[in-house]
Image (cartoon, helix red, strand yellow):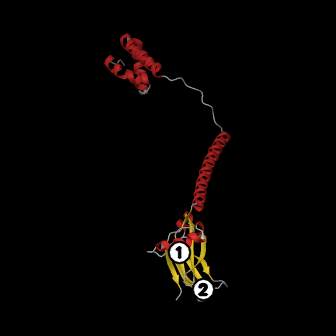
Amino acid sequence: MKYPCAMINDLLPLYADGVCSEESRQAVMEHLKDCACCRKEYEKMEQYATQNRNLHSVEAKPVAFIGTDSLIKVHRKLLFKRILTAAIAALVVIGLAAGTGMFMKNKVHSVVYNADSQNIRVVQESDGDIVARLYGTEWERVFSRTIELEDGKSAIIFSMTSSAWDDLMIGDNTASEYLVAGDGKDVGQIEQVYYLSQPVNELSYDELTQLFTTNPDQFTLLWEKE
């Protein structure tokens, strides 16, 4: 059966791509044998397709086959790197935390008396001991000195130091105690207990008594004998 050239030209793109039916392919082949015009049109189409393939062709590169054992080794290596990275990060965090804690532990300061919160309180227990309680932190060191008053009685003046770490970690309702006087010592002559917000140990006895006389406002009376 002879087909018109117009119909064959419509089928040529499908024929060239190999997507036409077997019946259409046979019809195109038979027509191209006898029709020089359609054959020339088909050759142009083939030439254009060849040039287009050469233009967009990419040289294939050999791909190395990775076996199962190699994949397992790669997976283990990646897993090891992840674990190592996580471990290093954890050590860095722990090191920073430990360093910060050590720095705050070593950052010692004088405890300042706060009249609003009464963070330092002195009481006399039922057994006669005079005890100081520090709230909201814990004392690192206590400096205490007994001075003589004009009437022959005595007064105890003490100061405390604390660390930035204890200031941060200890709650306001937690108290650390210090025995001001007692534990077998005679407290009968003690009339008053004062707190000084600067280290008592930095002052000599004479400097302390002179400061007590000339600047009494720097001393806070926390206990007085009834």
Who is closer to the viewer here, 22 or 161?
A: 161
Q: Is residue 174 visible?
A: no
The vertical placement of 136 against 23, above or below, is below
**Label total for image:** 2
Image location (x, y in percent) of residue 14: 40, 24
Q: Is 55 on the left-hand or right-hand side of 2?
A: right
Crowd around label 2: few <14 · some 14–19 · many ≥20 (10 Å) = few
Classify 57 as above or below 103: above
Please identify the quarter of the rendering in which residue 176 is found: bottom right
Asked which quadrant contains residue 179, the reply is: bottom right
Per the model, the C-alpha gap separating discs 1 and 2 is: 18 Å
Residue 187 at x, y = what percent? 61, 85
Residue 149 vertical placement versus 63 (above, below): below
Q: Nearer the viewer, mark 1 or mark 2?
A: 2
Question: Which of the labelled discs sits on residue 195, or is there none?
Answer: 1
- Measured from the top left, where is residue 34 in percent x and y? 39, 12
Query: Dividing the image into 4 quarters, which one contains the N terminus?
Result: top left
Q: Amino acid at mark 2?
A: Gln
Q: Nearer the viewer, residue 49 or 153?
A: 153
User: Three-letter amino acid code at disc 1?
Assistant: Tyr
Within 10 Å of disc 1 (Cα), the crowding (few <14, some 14-19, many 20+) is: many
Q: Which residue is mark 2?
A: 189
Residue occupying image coordinates x 56% and y 69%: 207
User: Cβ–Cβ below 8 Å for labels 1 and 2?
Assistant: no
Answer with mark 1 or mark 2, whichever residue precedes in sequence: 2
Q: Is residue 85 visible?
A: yes
Residue located 56% across and 75% down the image: 157
Secondary structure at numbered mark 1: strand
The image shows residue 73 at horizontal and vertical percentages of 67, 42
